[in-house]
Amino acid sequence: MSDLSAPNPVDRALGTVAMRWHGDSLELLDQRLLPVEEVWLPHTRATEVATSIRDMVVRGAPAIGISAAYGVVLAAKRATENGWKQTIEADMQVLAESRPTAINLFWALDRMRVVLATCDTRHQALRRLAEAAIGIHKDDLAANLAMADHALAVMDDRAPFSVLTHCNTGALATGGYGTALGVIRRLHEERMLKRVYADETRPWLQGSRLTAWELARDGIPVTLNADGAAAVILSQGDVKWVVVGADRITANGDVANKIGTYSLAVLARHHNVRFMVVAPASTVDMSLESGQEIPIEQRDGREICEIKGVQIAPDGIDVFNPVFDVTPASLIDAIVTERGVIHDPDITGMRALFSKG
């Protein structure tokens, strides 16, 4: 790739972007401030990128992985000629420790580590790592578009129909189009979509702050609902699919995603609504047999007890605040990746699509 200083490689017409690469710096849209403010934060160090990943400036498994890849490039830029490879490795470890559950983070760092191992000089590393990071970004966009194609081939074509989604899986969470929200965009483009119901997604409210904002911005019909209203919505018969993303998928088809996803899968099965998971192949972790092995991130209880610094719970109350839950494969009708679709996922179907042999 000849121009490593080109801005964000993703076509912005595909949706609002979460990151902008400038060759010597990475800008991240501060998603904590949306929808009230649009603030771009500059990053020139890998450690700054790690902090932004940990503090939820950028979130969504694919976007975390892409940001980390660019963080490695920034590490190479800051490294001195003496001990440059060890310096980059140390910064990669800091990036790896920023969030524990999203496998895309580790997948992206592993790809960058393979590239680093082929480099003999810091200058060579800088060029090859930049090419690799931009490639990861572009590949994610291509995967999003492919997933949308696969998903529409699965969905009932007796359109239009409504869907319900959880958390944010759009351009803000990916390289520029979306996983589950990319499918919803494509439904809208094909005039197959009646309406999107967007769970508010407590406690970070990604549904109300990000998903509703993205959809409204793009002219896609959206109704925001409290998480607890999902059962009533599904009972009315208008929603044909629940469509969500994933942060990690195990060898048997179990899926870790934003807390509340498991509840939706149970509700969908009760109301005969089909349940689809849309995620890139980089989200699949065939090294784990089931969802019981996935490390689930626990965050500060203040996220539950406060809203924008305003206390809403008693002092000293015990808080259970897992960021993710695990949806058993038995409750999932289809897992969609850029490689194809696994219907009624189990270990056989997962191995058929993802085994290296």
Image: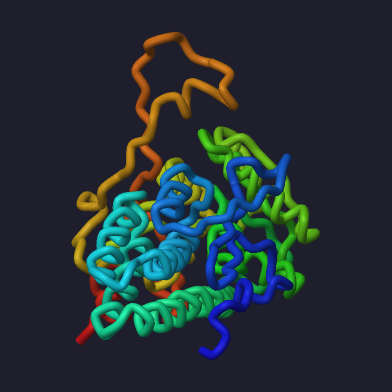
Regarding residue 268, the answer to whether it shows in the image is: yes
Query: Residue 100 placed where, x, y %?
Result: 31, 50
Place residue 317 in its image quadrant: top left
Q: Is residue 178 left or right of residue 34?
A: left
| 4 sits left or right of 316 in the view | right
Closest to the observer, 113 or 346: 113
**Taking 202 as reference, is 326 left or right?**
left
Residue 243 x, y percent position in the rendering: 54, 58
Name the residue located 59 percent from the left edge and 42 percent from the top edge: 32
67 w.r.t. 23: above or below: above
Which residue is at the far bottom? 2
- Give 336 or 96, whichever is nearer the viewer: 96
Q: Quadrant of residue 61?
A: bottom left
Which residue is at 43% across, 9% downward? 315
In the picture, residue 286 is in which quadrant?
Answer: bottom left
Question: Does residue 323 lie above or below 345 as drawn?
Answer: above
Residue shown at 54%/16% (left/top)? 312
Quadrant the C terminus occupies: bottom left
Question: According to the image, what is the colour scheme of the structure?
Answer: rainbow
Q: Does 164 sit above or below residue 8? A: above
Residue 158 seen anywhere in this rendered image of the structure: no
Left or right: 147, with 232 as reference point: left
Q: How many circles with numbers are drawn on the protein?
A: 0
- Residue 63: x percent and y percent? 49, 61
Residue 235 lies, in percent from the top left, at 60, 43
Instruction: Return the residue found at the far top.
Output: 315
